[in-house]
Amino acid sequence: MLEVKNLKKRFGDFEAVKGISFSVKKGEVLGFLGPNGAGKSTTMRMITGFLPPTSGTAVIDGHDIALEPVAAKAAIGYLPESAPSYRAMVVEDYLTFIAEIRGFTGAAARDAVARVIEKARLAPVARKTIETLSKGYRQRTCFAQAIIHDPKVLIMDEPTDGLDPNQKFTVREMIKEMAAEKAIVISTHILEEVDAVCTRAIVIADGEIKADGTPAQLKAMDPSGRLDVVFRNLTKGGAQ
């Protein structure tokens, strides 16, 4: 459902992403792991068409993001880092606005909004303004907008960063519930995300893939069997 082909990104003389390739199938939850500055967010932005690559491309549900950007983006749900939204809007009104942008009208729009409010556990705050919500509810509101069109590929950049343990648990349960029907990529530097929700993980450092495997395969790369030790071994010397 998602195929990334030799993506590269250069900013002047600095090469932030150095030829990354991987694929994600339906039913997979891929953890895209790396230290701060490793190139995770840049890669996610290129996959979603937010940032043009220097070279390479991404194919989403058969559509090349460079050649067929509208069709490719229609198959993507994107939750960017920091979860931006129109904070003066009421949650339900904001989601209705997003549904209409996605082409829903009338009863179809109302049904789509009701569906994502239920999936994101937003019923208690549906008639509150976004600016009054806790960070957890704001994150879930933005999660809801990312899935309102029922995308085949879901890409999330640091979806639980800054959330308390209860909020993290809720977001992870939401991801697990959707995993069977979508190809999901979670960009994160939080190692516990791998054990919590991921079926596979890629470790990136200095703009390059250092490892790709199941959580068990990654842990087996060090006698300690600890992911944090493997992560440090793979990424030391890279951007921090």
Image: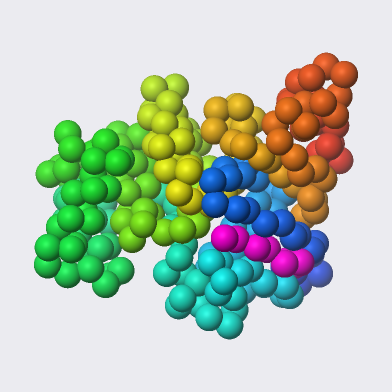
Q: Quadrant of the C terminus?
A: top right
Q: Residue 83's spot in the image, x, y percent?
A: 41, 49
Q: Is residue 158 left or right of residue 216?
A: left
Q: Residue 8's spot in the image, x, y percent?
A: 75, 67
Q: Quadrant of the rendered structure where residue 120 is?
A: top left
- The residue at the far top in this view is 224
Q: Is residue 211 left or right of residue 200?
A: right
Q: Which residues are magenta?
A: 1-8
In this rendering, the answer to whether 65 lies above or below 92 is below
Indicate yes or no whether the magenta region holds residue 5: yes
Q: Is residue 90 left or right of residue 216?
A: left
Q: Residue 68's spot in the image, x, y percent?
A: 53, 80
In this rendering, the answer to whether 204 lies above or below 72 is above
Indicate yes or no whether the magenta region holds residue 226: no
Q: Main secondary structure of the magenta part?
A: strand
* Residue closer to the observer: 181 or 115: 181
Q: Residue 26's spot in the image, x, y percent?
A: 54, 52
Residue at (45, 65) in percent of width and height? 75
Residue at (26, 36) in percent of width and height? 121
Q: Is residue 20 left or right of residue 94?
A: right
Q: Quadrant of the N terminus?
A: bottom right
* Residue closer to the observer: 208 or 211: 211
Residue 157 visible from this viewpoint: no
Residue at (58, 83) in percent of width and height? 67
